Amino acid sequence: MTHRTLSTQFLIASGLVILIATLSAGYLTTRLVSDKALNSKAGTTALLVQSLTEAEVQALALSKVLPAASITLLDSLFDGPDFKARFPHIEIWAPDGTVAYSRTKQMIGHRFSFPEGLKRALKGDIVAVYADLHADEHTFRNIDTQYLEIYSPLHDQASGRIIGVAEIHEDPSGFAGEVARLRIVTWTTVALFSFVVMLGLFLIVRRGSRTIETQRHALSHRAEEAELASKELMELRDTARRASMELANMNETFIRRIGADLHDGPVQLMTLAILQLDELRDLTRKDERDRALDATNKALGEALIETRAVTKSLLLPEILHLWAKDVVAEAIKQHEARTRTKVAFTSSGTNADLPPALKTCIYRFVQEGLNNAYRHAGANGQRVRCRIDMPVISISVEDDGLPPGTLPLAAREGGMGLYGLRQRIESFGGSLTIGKRPDGGMVLAMTLELQQADAAAH
């Protein structure tokens, strides 16, 4: 389903409400304006007719008919061509419904059913309505034009009571045009006002909607980032957990190998020396004792060499007071002293003081990388690069490969190997890569991000 913004929802809902309100307000306003215009016109016309006829119909206070002289005078008043064009028919009603005067002479003296306008006029109201063509007085003379009928009460000048009603039929064409114009103006005003109100409200809501949408997108983006970070954190935790387990297994294997090295090397040699000492007690000849002592001395010397080799692979030089680049330099120095080879070292970026666990990790990486270069490349082109761009540390160990016609150098396996090194680095949230150089040789590279590494180290 398509997501609609708050401003769109408001536009749809308020559009319907304001449309209904506009139609209702327009209809009521137009009706009121039209009625007001009609009543205003009726009042003006009634005032005109009253001023012309009221003095001539005072006879209705005593009789239901007018004298002939009054009828003649009224005819003379209403016979003007302009007056007749505007008011085609004029009747004067007696209070009992008898026609006391009419331009249609056949109607004078006739009594018809009371029109609604006549009833209201007899109560004192000025009434304007459109003609009912089915009324008796209209069917009597076959009127088929829907005139505007204006009923005006006529009063006794002495007592003020209503003595008759003047009914004027006016041509509605001019008035209809005026009413139509008023309706257009009214509808236009109401529609324009409604549009301005809706536009103002919409702009306010749209600004709020944009703020809400911006915040919603930001929250959604942050939620996605949080979910992604959570997944990455879970993966890192799983990786760290696996690395810790594998590191524990590797340490156990390493301890067994050290035990085997001690058992197969120094222990065997010392056992041999002890046996030779036991034999020495039974020897009486000097030359035999000398040979036995030489053999014992040789066995103990070899045992000492074997023991030193094992312990040297376990102990690190003092590196706790060194910074990161100095740890790398110390590992290179120890390798050069041990193998009597040269290593090129380049560094860039800043320096950093690291936790002891990270210093050990860096030292072991450089040590293992240089040992591999010494064993498998004959120490050909050994070089170390170190770059620290906080918070990232990148170190690589490279070689140019074994020269043609040479064999790898033999070296004792004194470290934990690349597998153990990878587990150690990954336990700090880092990465280890191994690859071949395009022009020959290998490159071993590690990358550590200090924030993750510090968290893992602590």
Image (cartoon, rainbow, N blue to C red):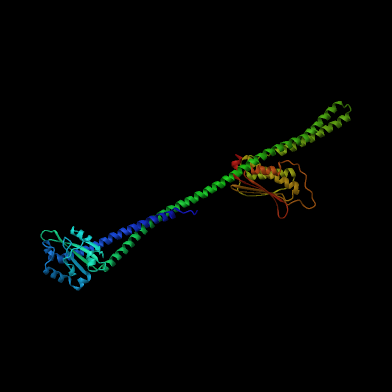
Would you say 45 lies left or right of 407 here?
A: left
Where residue 140 appears, as percent x and y from the top left, is: 22, 67
Residue ranking furthest to the bottom: 81
**Residue at left 19%, top 60%?**
121
Q: Is residue 83 above or below residue 232?
A: below
Residue 27 visible somewhere in the drawing: yes
Residue 79 in which image quadrant? bottom left
In the drawing, does residue 24 fall left or right of residue 82? right
Spot occupied by residue 434 in the image (x, y as percentages of width and height): 69, 49
Judge by depth and name the residue closer to the eye, 248 or 261. Answer: 248
Residue 271 rendering spot, x and y as whole percentages: 80, 31
Image location of residue 311, percent across then percent down? 72, 36
Q: In the image, what residue occupies the spot 47% across and 52% down?
A: 214
Instruction: Name which quarter of the figure residue 120 lies in.
Output: bottom left
> On the picture, is 152 further left or further right than 202?
left
The answer to whether residue 103 is seen in the rendering is no
Of 447 and 356, which appears nearest the observer? 447
- Location of the C terminus by quadrant is top right
